[in-house]
Structure formats: structure tokens, C-alpha cells
Image: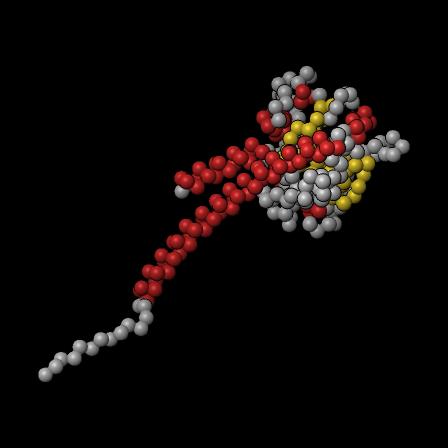
């Protein structure tokens, strides 16, 4: 007499097993997502640093080739109102004390800009949907007849020794400008204008394939082009100096690198 052993095959998971598997997947997904956030942030910081270094190199190359700085940069000024373009990075706005309200320079300073090659600038049309392409309205700093073009520029807020601003600290820390005296320090001898490298910059097509859009901002909502800073002597004598670059949110090259390495360290700790 043979005893037949029934082999009942299982046709699926039990509810308990499914719950356990789903719980494990949720935990793993959470770990992956947290790491992805850090990867994206580090990528943006690294790309920002690379972009700023490239803009510095290309601007200097342009100057060597053309004996002057590139024209056609964005002023960050609204063409209609004359105020600061509303869609610049929120990091540049109050409560930050980085920038002054747009204002004209002295006629002698305008002549220095023209001599440096910076006589043609672009103001912003607030009706353009993509903020980084809003620089469309051309202006001459010095008109063809030699008169002032009335161009307004955004300058860095230098504050005072007693009441230092974000702008003053930026100039002293990132660009090595003397800031420790309210009369003789370099910070008081110049106006520091900030321009954006947009599609109409004369670097595009010469030393740049296209004007870069920086990943530090939501480019669909805010102006996301790299910024360049020039020092214009208040005396109206001497020459305009290129100081360096800023990301569209006001971050410096060193700041972008520091952010990258900080995020790297945080990622390792987790």
C-alpha cells in the first residue's frame, strides 16, 4: 500500500508577506530619495562653480582679442519702470543688503565705461515669459553725439564700516577690496556695477557658444544668467576694472565650491 503525499503548490504571497515587502520597499525608496536630493544639490553647486570659472576665462579672452570688454550685457533694470528687474533671484532682494536701487552714473564714469568697451547694454522687458531672455531693450551708455544715454545701473551696496552690508562683505571677502576705512579704502573709491551675461552679450558667438543658464535658480521663474562685476572709479579718471563673477543668486565662485564640499561632507555623514 502506497501513501501518496500531496504537494500543494503555493499560488501567491500571503497578506503578511506583502506588507513586509512593501515596508522594505518604502524604506529603500526613502533612502534613495534623500540621496538624490543631495546629488542634485551637489551637481548644481559644481556646475555653478564651473560656469563662473568659464565666464571669467571667456571674458578675459574676449578682452585680449578685442582690446575691450564685451558689450551687450543685461543691466538687471526694468526697461519700463527703471527699477530693479522684478524677477532677479530672491537671494538678491531684501532682507539681503547686497544691491542698491538702480541709478545713473556720473557722465565721466559713463565715458570710462565706453572706453572700456561697455557702451551698449540691454534692459529688461517684464512681459517676456522666460526671465533669462528678458534682456531685449538696447541702450547706449554714451549716445552717438557724446551725451549721456541716461542708463541706470545696479551697483553693489557698500554700506559703511560701522554698518557693513552684504555687499561690503562680499567685496572684501570674495574680491579682495579694501573695506576697513570710510574715506580712503578702495570700497569707497568705486561704484561696483553688476551686469548679467545674457543672449545679447557680445561674447556669444565669439568666445561663448551660448549664454549659460545657471542651475541655482528655477529658470522658469527667475533670471538665471551669470553675473559679472566691474569697478568704475567715482573720480571719472583711470580705468574700469573687471572684479569677477557671481552666480545669479549672488554666490561667488569660492562660495559655490564651498557649498559643493559642504554637501559632499553632509552626504558622507549620512
Question: 215 or 154, which is in the foreground?
Answer: 215
Of all residues, the one furthest to the front in this rendering is: 65
Q: Which residue is found at the position 63% from the left and 20% from the top?
A: 178
x and y, in percent, of residue 23 in the image: 36, 58
x and y, in percent, of residue 176 in the image: 61, 23
Q: Which residue is found at the position 71% from the left and 47% from the top?
A: 133
Is residue 242 visible in the rendered image? The answer is: yes
Q: Which residue is found at the position 69% from the left and 47% from the top?
A: 131
Q: How is the image coloured?
A: secondary structure
**For residue 255, side relative to residue 92 (left or right):** left
Name above or below for residue 40 compared with residue 158: below
**For residue 256, side relative to residue 209 (left or right):** left
Of all residues, the one furthest to the bottom in this rendering is: 1
Quadrant of the rendered structure where residue 142 is? top right
**For residue 8, side relative to residue 48 (left or right):** left
Of all residues, the one furthest to the top in this rendering is: 184
Q: Which residue is found at the position 72% from the left and 43% from the top?
A: 205
Quadrant of the rendered structure where residue 103 is? top right
Say which quadrant the C terminus sits in. Answer: top left
Is residue 95 visible in the rendered image? The answer is: no
x and y, in percent, of residue 120 in the image: 79, 36
**For residue 59, side relative to residue 7 (left or right):** right
Of all residues, the one furthest to the right in this rendering is: 145
Amino acid at each position: 500500500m502506497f501513501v501518496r503525499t500531496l504537494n500543494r503548490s503555493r499560488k501567491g504571497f500571503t497578506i503578511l508577506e506583502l506588507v513586509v515587502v512593501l515596508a522594505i520597499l518604502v524604506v529603500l525608496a526613502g533612502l534613495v530619495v534623500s540621496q538624490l536630493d543631495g546629488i542634485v544639490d551637489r551637481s548644481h553647486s559644481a556646475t555653478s562653480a564651473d560656469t563662473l570659472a568659464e565666464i571669467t576665462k571667456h571674458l578675459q579672452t574676449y578682452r585680449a582679442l578685442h582690446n575691450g570688454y564685451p558689450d551687450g550685457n543685461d543691466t538687471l533694470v526694468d526697461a519700463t519702470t527703471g527699477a530693479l528687474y522684478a524677477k532677479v533671484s530672491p537671494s538678491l532682494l531684501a532682507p539681503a543688503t547686497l544691491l542698491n536701487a538702480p541709478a545713473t552714473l556720473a557722465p565721466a564714469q559713463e565715458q570710462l565705461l565706453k572706453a572700456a568697451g561697455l557702451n551698449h547694454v540691454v534692459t529688461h522687458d517684464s512681459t517676456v515669459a522666460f526671465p533669462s531672455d528678458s534682456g531685449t531693450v538696447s541702450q547706449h551708455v554714451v549716445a552717438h553725439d557724446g551725451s549721456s544715454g541716461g542708463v541706470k545701473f545696479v551697483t553693489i551696496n557698500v554700506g559703511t564700516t560701522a554698518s557693513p552690508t552684504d555687499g561690503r562683505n562680499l567685496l572684501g571677502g570674495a574680491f579682495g577690496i579694501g573695506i576697513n576705512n570710510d574715506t580712503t579704502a578702495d570700497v569707497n573709491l568705486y561704484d561696483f556695477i553688476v551686469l548679467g551675461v545674457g543672449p545679447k552679450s557680445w561674447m556669444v558667438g565669439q568666445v561663448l557658444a551660448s549664454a549659460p543658464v545657471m542651475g541655482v535658480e528655477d529658470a522658469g521663474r527667475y533670471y538665471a544668467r551669470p553675473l559679472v562685476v566691474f569697478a568704475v572709479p567715482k573720480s571719472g579718471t583711470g580705468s574700469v576694472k573687471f572684479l569677477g563673477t557671481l552666480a545669479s543668486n549672488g554666490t561667488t565662485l569660492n562660495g559655490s565650491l564651498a557649498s559643493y564640499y559642504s554637501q559632499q561632507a553632509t552626504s558622507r555623514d549620512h
